[in-house]
Image (cartoon, helix red, strand yellow):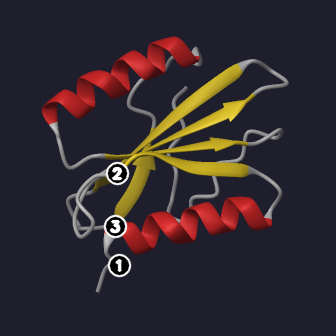
Amino acid sequence: MLLSTDIWVGALIRRAEVSGAFAMVERKGDANAGSVLVKVLNRPRGTATLYAEATRMDGERFWMQPHASDQERELDDYIARAVSRDPDLWVVEIDDRQGRHFLTEPVEQTS
């Protein structure tokens, strides 16, 4: 059984904060079944990374980078377009000096 989105987001934020990062909900979506985008900021490097949840054919959940840019402005534009298509979408922003995402599911990196 999967957790509701609001509980899952709360756990992600807690993991980040316990590890010394700052995390917050930028946009609330559907509390029970909304999709989530996670934007990670690494201010010392001046970069950002965006993660989106996805599901494989076998039902396994994983995270991927839906947009390869590391520029925050470009990622914000991508997020705005995604929100216009999906009003139930959640957006979580994590500001971490090490650029950690704190996701526990598999994360596929882009090359």
Residue 109 appears left or right of 47: left
Q: Are marks 3 and 1 in contact (CB under 8 Å)?
A: yes
Q: Residue 107: which numbered mark, if any?
A: none
Assign a secondary structure to mark 2.
loop
Residue 103 in percent (x, y) is at 57, 59
Between the residue at mark 1 and the residue at mark 2, the CA separation in whole angstroms equals: 16 Å
Q: Amino acid at mark 3?
A: Thr
Q: Nearer the viewer, mark 2 or mark 3?
A: 2
Determine whether 18 is above or below 93 in the image.
below
| Residue 41, image quadrant | top right
Q: Amino acid at mark 1?
A: Leu
Q: Amino acid at mark 2?
A: Lys
Q: Are marks 2 and 3 in contact (CB under 8 Å)?
A: no
Residue 56 in percent (x, y) is at 27, 57
Tag 2: Cα neighbours inside 10 Å, few (<14), some, or many (≥20)? Answer: some
Q: Nearer the viewer, mark 1 or mark 2?
A: 2
Residue 96 in percent (x, y) is at 76, 42
Query: Which residue bears the numbered disc 2?
Result: 28
- Locate the N terminus by quadrant: bottom left
| Residue 84, image quadrant | top left
Between the residue at mark 3 and the residue at mark 1, the CA separation in whole angstroms equals: 6 Å
Front-most of 32 and 47? 32
Q: Residue at x 20, y 59 (%)?
A: 57
Front-most of 110 and 10? 10
Q: Residue 5: which numbered mark, if any?
A: 3
Residue 22 appears left or right of 6: right
Tell me which label, 1 or 2, sits earlier in the chain: 1
- Locate the C terminus by quadrant: top right
